Image (cartoon, rainbow, N blue to C red):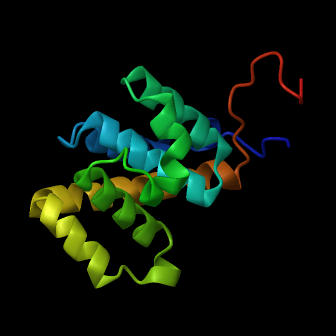
Amino acid sequence: MQPRLNPYEIAPQTMQPMLDLEAQVKKSGLELGLIELVKTRASQINGCAYCIHMHTRDARAKGESEERLYLLDAWRESPLYSPRERAALAWTEALTLVSQTHAPDEDYEQLSAQFSVQERVKLTLLIATINAWNRIAIGFRSLHPVGTGHAGA
C-alpha cells in the first residue's frame, strides 16, 4: 500500500483546526485511558491500521494492559471493562456505525447513567473526532511505522 498524500504538507492551514480539536479533546477532562480505548475501538470498527497502531501504543504508554487491548474488539463478552467504559464503548460503536444504529435509546440511557451531560458532549466530540481522523488516515492511506521482523519487511 502506498500513501496517497500528506495532508499536513498539502493543506496545513486546513488541517490545523483538526489538530486544535484533537488538543481540546485531550484536555476535556475525560480519563486518558478511556480516551485511548474509545479511539482504538472506533479505529478497529473503521479498519484504520494507522490509528489502531497509534492508539494502542498510546494506551500502553498510559498503563493500559495488553489483555484489555487484545479483548477490546470483544468487550461485551469480557468482564475486564468497567460500567463506565462499557457505556463509552457502546456509544462509540453506536455513533461510529450511526447509519446502521441510529444511536439507540438503550445506548444513550446507558451513557446517561455513567456520564454527566457535559461528559456526554465531550465523549461524543471525542468519537466524532476519531472518526474524522480515521477517514483522513484511510482516505490518504497513511502508513503506521513498521519495525523489523514483520512479514512485509
- Residue 35 located left or right of residue 4: left
Front residue of 66/144: it is: 66
- Count how many numbered circles sit on residues in the image: 0
- Residue 76 located left or right of residue 140: left
- Residue 60 located left or right of residue 145: left
Q: Position of residue 77 (x, y in %)?
A: 46, 58
Q: Residue furthest top?
A: 148
- Residue 114 located left or right of residue 57: left
Answer whether residue 55 is visible to the viewer in this image.
no
Quarter that holds the N terminus? top right
Q: Position of residue 98 (x, y in %)?
A: 46, 77
Front residue of 146/105: it is: 105
Answer whether residue 57 is visible to the viewer in this image.
yes
Q: Residue visible at 33% across and 36% down?
A: 33
Q: Residue visible at 67% across and 39% down?
A: 6
Q: Residue visible at 37% across and 49% down?
A: 79
Q: Position of residue 109 (x, y in %)?
A: 20, 75
Q: Position of residue 147 (x, y in %)?
A: 75, 18
Quarter that holds the C terminus? top right
Location of residue 89 by image quarter = bottom left
Q: Residue visible at 89% across and 29% down?
A: 151
